[in-house]
Amino acid sequence: MSQPQAKFLKDYQTPSFQISHIDLNFSLAEKQTELIATSKVIRQGEHNQALVLVGDEIELVSVTVAGEAVSYEQRDGELVIETSLDEFELQITTKLDPEANTSLEGLYMSDGAYCTQCEAEGFRRITYFLDRPDVLAIYTVRIEADKQAFPYLLSNGNLVDSGDTDNGLHFAKWHDPFPKPAYLFALVAGDFDLLEDSFTTCSQRNIKLQVFVDKGNLNKAHHAMASLKKSMKWDESRFNLEYDLDIYMIVAVDFFNMGAMENKGLNVFNTKFVLADKDSATDDDYHGIESVVGHEYFHNWTGNRVTCRDWFQLSLKEGLTVFRDQEFSSDLGSRAVNRIHAIKVIKNQQFAEDSGPMAHPIRPESVIEMNNFYTVTVYNKGAEVIRMMHTLLGEIGFQKGMALYFERHDGQAVTCDDFVAAMQDASGVDLSQFKRWYSQAGTPQVNVKEEFDEENQRYTLTLEQSTPATPDGSAKLPLHIPFDIELLDVAGSQLINKVLDFTEAKQEFTFEGLLQKPVPSLLQNFSAPVKLDFDYSVEQLVHIMRFATSEVAKWEASVALFSQSVWQNVARLQTPQAMFIDPRIVDAFKGVILAQDLDKALMAEILTLASAGSLIEQKACVDLDCLALAREFVVLEIAANCEDELLVKVREQANIDDASARALKNVCLSLLLKVDSNYAALAKQQFESAENMTDSLGALSALNGEPSTVRDQLMTEFEQKWLTTPLVMDKWFGLHATLNSDNCIDKLTSLFEHQAFSFNNPNRVRSLIGIFAAANTFEFHRIDGLGYQFLTDAIIKLNTLNPQVAARIITPLIQFKKFDKVRQQLMANELNRILAVDNLSKDLYEKVTKALV
Ligand code: B3K
Ligand code: ZN
């Protein structure tokens, strides 16, 4: 079999044909769905090339051009049609088998409902087409199906006709007036409960809002609906963007490869990001729903009205839309806590990607399987790049840039360069050097040295930047880095707060008129996605924790303090010497618990001590066994020395009905359980009196630190209560997956047989297998290799069932270069086992071959 080939950005060519209109006529029937697609095709420019369409896993029935049968050729997923006409009607009939489609791409079935997922290249599983984002067509869609089984027949745009036909069938016809690329096409047919509402836009247009959920879940759709209305309002007030169609629909389905999909006027969502009520969803779930509903809604302008020219430009819509959803959450909730969550994604996951085999710039230059590039780099680092532009331009300049971008490109398929040009032209800020962020992979390292000249009252910061080489070989030139700093005096007052324009490989910044040496709080608010290397003393970090103006800086300092102590103890263990914690560190954390003026949610963030996974990301090579011991030691020292204060907090916050109070209480409870297993009684009490999922799960998570009979008993109670609620069972699977116990893998293997588990459902797979590999660091990296084997067996099984999911959960296995030789070898062995599989998907092939280089 031939090896999958990469495509390159540099090879981009404009399409030789455009399709301006397409009529899709679906007859949905078991095993035999028929589709007649009628397109208006227009040759672009003077040439006599054939029309080449792509198709995948579909049965071709017939092809006509201008009403006549034509000769055509089928080769390697392509349909080649020779014609001399410049403008013609093309009709293609295909047959599909949605029931057999377990990849959840194209047209498939989710729990008895038909639905589609076309981004990135799923439309070619529906019909032969110019399946590329720079071909924008007007869609008219007719769907016919059994009326009783599929009372709702939905597609993009506006409903223009509907009615009954013969034999218990009915039909609906939809028309979307906005030209769109095929990846935004959607169809849904099924039986649902429907929540309806409406929204009046700033220009007084009335929009119908509909949320479709599985039968019996109507009472869980209200938060999603409220989030949608908030999103619509926010986009008008902050970005001056109004919704364009007369109807906006969201359908929640249980089988979905990712979070949600922004199809024009008809979003399809994973139930995880729609369904919520107090009993079954945590505060984090509520927050996640709000942000994903917002994200998909915001795509209507950043993604749909202005779309991507080609898939290499994915960050054009994704980085920008993540930035917009982050701003939405920050305007509605705590800016600091939202920022902390975003920073954690970059430091824990994106930095790992940047230093691993799949490193790529936010605008990749070569791709084998596009689905592999829906990454934390494209999305989250992409959002950081937009955020830096926002920092450089300011809100007013940035909004001017957005306005110009829409003025120039509404209705077009464009590039990241077009976006930057609009930002630059509207603001007058030179972004030529800044653009390197789009083409350079890897995490820049910024080394900072300080010097204080007492005599001249001058303080100097010397900044040096460099980016380590990455496997893609992209150049590493100095970047334009907005470097936000605050200087504090000895009493804790702010002396200076500014954003340094750091553009050279090495640059000095001097500050005059300082009487004493200040304490610098560097890279405040994580103003650029870089690794900071500055030798902070314990004293300086404690000072920042107490006095920094920025709450994010306080949190960053607490992470640095905790991490420093863990690494020092790793070094002691290696020498070997006895472990030790500086009492000033314990005091700093105690000070946080006792602080009167600290926001509770921030306090909870600070007390959520850095995970093993995030510590690993701080170093190039890690001694895992020493890390496990050292982290455990430092956590225990902090917790044990703050036991009384933690207990007070748990009691004080116990009955407060507020998400921050619950977050604080639950993190304190977890720390108490580290100190003494007798606190299990407290967790049990919380579990039994819990009136919401956050508290039930908080108790179980606290007990999940180590095996115990109380834990087992409560886990069984929980299981029985929620056996038929899949999203809650995901939490239960996730708890099993993160238990730090020798038996963890046996237990997980036995859970494959659990009535609530299925390899066909991505949410279940992620909860049981994905969470294990990504979050149960020490069990996954067991020195006997059983963790790697467990993951590999699952991946091999998923290779045929659902390649996208398989390629997602493999991530921890390909990032192996940090570990000791024994583990590296064990991981490489498993990767070789995957490579030897027959019919290996492109998705896995790309990741495994890159990892094994
Ligand atoms: N655009 C989709 C993601 C599609 C992923 C395809 N493998 C969801 C989003 O980012 O909003
Ligand atoms: Zn998106």
Image (cartoon, rainbow, N blue to C red):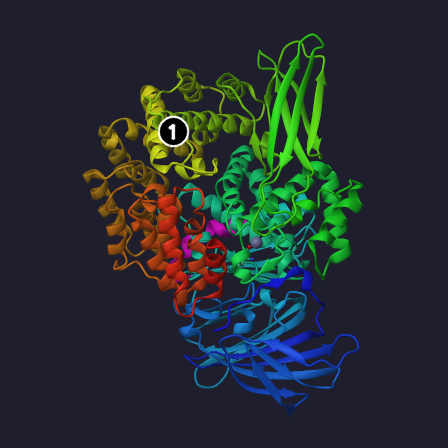
For label 1, the crowd category at 10 Å Cα-Cα, with few meaning under 14, some 14 to 19 and many 20 or more, is: many
Q: Is residue 220 magenta?
A: yes
Q: Amino acid at mark 1?
A: Val
Q: Nearer the viewer, residue 33 or 315?
A: 315
Q: What residue do we see at 33% from left, 29% from top?
A: 671
Asked which secondary structure carries label 1, the reply is helix
Q: Is residue 677 above or below residue 546?
A: below
Visible in this render: residue 193? no
Q: What residue do we see at 68% from left, 51% from top?
A: 241
Q: Nearer the viewer, residue 239 or 729?
A: 729
Q: Is residue 9 above or below residue 281?
A: below
The residue at which mark 1 appears reads as 570
Q: Nearer the viewer, residue 148 or 297?
A: 297
Q: What residue do we see at 52% from left, 67% from top?
A: 4
Quarter, ligand 1: bottom right
The magenta stretch spans which residues? Answer: 214-227
Visible in this render: residue 212? yes
Quadrant in the picture for residue 110 = bottom left
